Image (cartoon, coloured by chain):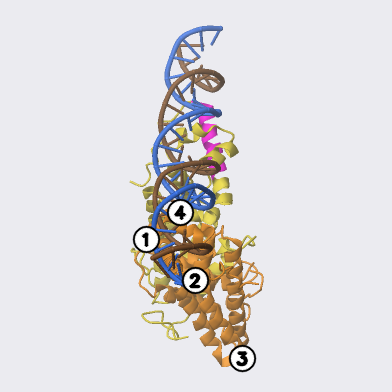
Chain colours: A orange, B yellow, C blue, D brown
Amino acid sequence: MLGSPHEPARTSRADAARDRELLLAAAEAEFAERGLDASVADIARRAGVGEGTVFRHFATKDDLIAAIVRTHVGAPDEVGQRLLTAEDPAAAPLEFRAVAGGQREQRDVSFLLNADDASPEVVALRERLYRTVCLLVDHARAAGAVRADVAVQADVTGNDAVLLMCTPNHVVSFVKDPPPDLWRRYLAIIFGGLRRPEGAHPLTPAAPAL
Amino acid sequence: MLGSPHEPARTSRADAARDRELLLAAAEAEFAERGLDASVADIARRAGVGEGTVFRHFATKDDLIAAIVRTHVGAPDEVGQRLLTAEDPAAAPLEFRAVAGGQREQRDVSFLLNADDASPEVVALRERLYRTVCLLVDHARAAGAVRADVAVQADVTGNDAVLLMCTPNHVVSFVKDPPPDLWRRYLAIIFGGLRRPEGAHPLTPAAPAL
DNA sequence: CAGTAAGCGGACCGATGGGTCAGGTTAACT
DNA sequence: AGTTAACCTGACCCATCGGTCCGCTTACTG
């Protein structure tokens, strides 16, 4: 249900396949540089193809974005799934690492994944990744690696895992010339918050007793 | 240097002043609903005025945004400054509260403040608020409320205060129908991370030992 | 109650960007 | 080499949006 990239029936021509790759690479670079509203014309120019060629391979701009996101979300999601089936409680810290790896994977395209006007397919990919992260956090909590009152639900509302998904990439994007592992530092801070020994400052329901 | 809103020489007409307020309110609501690219036409319609009237009061759309941001940044910034001049080491927790207050103030307009293509005036306001938060965190650290290796610099690069500034609002915006104080919970988690006892998991320079 | 300048409205303009299409081009196969 | 269908191109179309302009309206002043 999620893995139907509606490939346009396997082309036999080599140039078409090459153009498709050129386009994906150019689009990713262009989006990383110019943000969500990089123009299709610029992407085509960067790929060295005509503008019409873009729409031959990707019906709409949203489809192009979805294709990029699909590439990036696939890897960390698989890693996550594999860790879950491992069933090793001692792997909890490793699971956290997987999340971190996902963060690095997404670095330059996180805003594509998290755009508020994302296409249905991107939303589906996002929610799938959310669910994986939730499961990882759940496992880690069962293993005692995070405090028990950390909220993890399939529903996104009130889900602390959102912090792990969104924060480091987005915050890093506000820093000019960020050190390449700044996101790691931020992630560490949030992990610290999730792991604090319980009792001192309950997270719910009211204000944190500052 | 920062407080010159270049008011257009005090008008004597009551309708103009009223329209200005209507516009600010309408724009804020429209931005909150539709995001950064709410159209000027829609804002005008919502305010019940002509499109030209918008540009009579605000030379450009960016000016309108800056006016909104100015309103929201003013209050928390003043609170912060006041806390700083208090010179009371016991006020550290209160200083945290000030940050929290800032978060609440900005809720719906944080993306205006943090837009990556913000106008010079908005950038100035943002950096001013950053500095205030940095000073607050610095005070709190001096008072022993946060771990010593939390980085706070006037320069934004590598500044952990960015987490406090950006995260809760942004993350909350990814949650559909967020409970009104979800940001508070997220802030509490980050505070927890910043306050963890030192030694166990150093924040710098390398990866957190997960 | 005029007189007047400030204010207002909304048609209009130029720029930009997503998406289309007709016609030339080319890779694969025989 | 010849055939053909898939492919590519870029001029074009249309919608949207920020910003302008000029004639009309209206709130203040004397």
Viewer-side label of 2, 1: 2
Residue A42: name its quadrant: bottom left
- Disc number lying in front (3 or 4): 3
Between marks 4 and 2, how big is the CA–CA gap?
Answer: 50 Å
**Subunit of mark 1?**
A
* Secondary structure found at label 4: helix
Q: Within 10 angstroms of label 2, few (less than 14), some, or many (20 or more) residues?
A: few
Q: Residues within 10 Å of mark 1 (few under 14, many from 20)?
A: few
Residue that carries the numbered disc 4 in the rendered image: B113
Name the residue tied to disc 3: A87
Residue B98: x %, y % from top left: 49, 60
Q: Residue at the spot x=45%, y=75% of the render?
A: A104
Q: Is residue B37 above or below residue D23?
A: below
Our reading of the magenta stretch's main secondary structure is helix
The amino acid type of the residue labelled 1 equals Gly
Chain for disc number 2: A
* Residue that label 1 marks: A48
* B32 lies above or below C3: below
Range shown magenta: B13-27
